[in-house]
Amino acid sequence: MSIFHKLRVLIKDIAYIWRKEMRQVIRDEGVFMFFIVVPLAYPLLYSWIYNNETVHDVPVAVVDQSHSHLSRQFIRDCDATPDVHVAYHAEDLDEAKSLVSRQLVKGIYLIPSDFATRINRMEQGVVNVYCDMSLMLTYKAIFQTAMAVSQKMGKEMQVKLSGNYTNREDAVTVQPLAYDDIALFNPSGGYGSCILPGVLILILQQTLVLGIGMAAGTTRERSRYGNLIPDDKNYKGVYRIVGGKALCYAMVYAVMAAYLTLVVPKLFSFPLLINGKDLLLIMVPYVIACIFFGMTVSSFVRYRENVMLIMVFVSVPLLFLSGVSWPQSNIPSFWRGVSWLFPSTFGIRAYVRMNSMGASFNQVLPEVRYMWIQAAVYLSLACLVYRYQFYLSHRMAKKAEKA
């Protein structure tokens, strides 16, 4: 048999497996949902929620147990800010909690009875802040407003006690060093511009692994011997199966990756500093690594629902471990090593640095190399997994023949 004939047979077998997998993606409702519907709809919903970047006039309830001039000044200053609106004055904390439970307010300012007394004694005054944590934007507005007002009142008291004679002396007392506070790579200080680029990359990995795992669970349930090899005589050869499946997933997620990294940021005006060439150079190894990672993980999936319990549970930890929403330097060494097992760690870092921070491709070259290494390692593991499945299938077939 000539090498050209062998190559033609190999391509024909890969095309056959690709066609069967593509048919399963379209016909299987669960796989279709994770491969097509969720990547299309979920980013739009998540981006729409945080599209405003910042919130204004967040309603809060105030429990003023001090009833003093200083407590009333604190309340007036909070209400005067654009971020907070004092909507209710509650008699006690229980009434304020009732307002939060009915979603009439998003937070509580509790001013204790000794607030003014402690300040007049030159002691530190305390204001208790309770926030509804269901939406990070409201929490940020309520907490930062309380901090800003308390600092402002502290500066005013500092000026009164300084004994200065001129306005210049007062200004130096309050702010010895003039500075401008500018958030690096996020001038608006918005939550969406900071977090959502990383979330979009994580969605690619999670939906891909969920879809592959659900397809593997379906194959196991329908297979005669309960393994990853379908009852089809054309599924022969490890490299044919891995190549055909990977080709199917790559074709689907080439479209999904372009949609998530180009269309969604454009629709919601998120940062989009990366050019097409650099985006292609980081997304190709990332998608390939995610595909073979998903095929490796699918070997542990016995039933369709199992993969949902695994991947949905680790979604939030993976976002933290990527170093986007939590400082990478503060992550313990053990968990930093665990994060290297997932393609999303390096994919998120490379994309965010180039797309939001304006880094060049050479500056994210280490992350790209790690993704290619992950792709090679998970390709080898996927081949070993399917080779083992072939071994189990042949052994079970021989036992059935003897029986």
Image: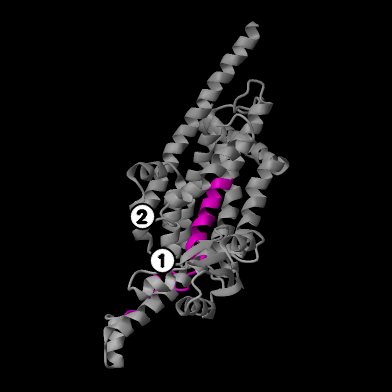
The answer to whether mark 2 and mark 1 are in CB contact below 8 A is no
Q: Viewed as shown, does residue 153 lie left or right of 311?
A: left
Observer able to see residue 271: no
Q: Viewed as shown, does residue 391 lie left or right of 21?
A: left
Report the disc number at residue 357.
1
Q: Which residue is mark 2?
A: 365
Depth check, front residue: 12 or 236? 236
Above or below, 336 relative to 269:
above
Observer able to see residue 67: yes
Q: Which residues are magenta?
A: 179-207
Above or below, 376 relative to 164:
above
Q: Residue at x 68, y 45 (%)?
A: 32
Residue 302 screen position, x and y as percent = 60, 29
Residue 301 screen position, x and y as percent = 58, 32
Residue 41 screen position, x and y as percent = 65, 56
Q: Residues within 10 Å of mark 2 (few under 14, many from 20)?
A: some
Q: Considering only order in the chain, which callout, 1 or 2, is on the residue closer to the N terminus?
A: 1
Q: Viewed as shown, does residue 181 lie left or right of 94?
A: left
Helix, strand or loop at mark 2: helix
Depth check, front residue: 69 or 142? 69
For the C terminus, the quadrant is top right
Residue 336 screen position, x and y as percent = 37, 45
For the N terminus, the quadrant is top right
Depth check, front residue: 247 or 114? 114
**Scheme of colours in the image:** one colour
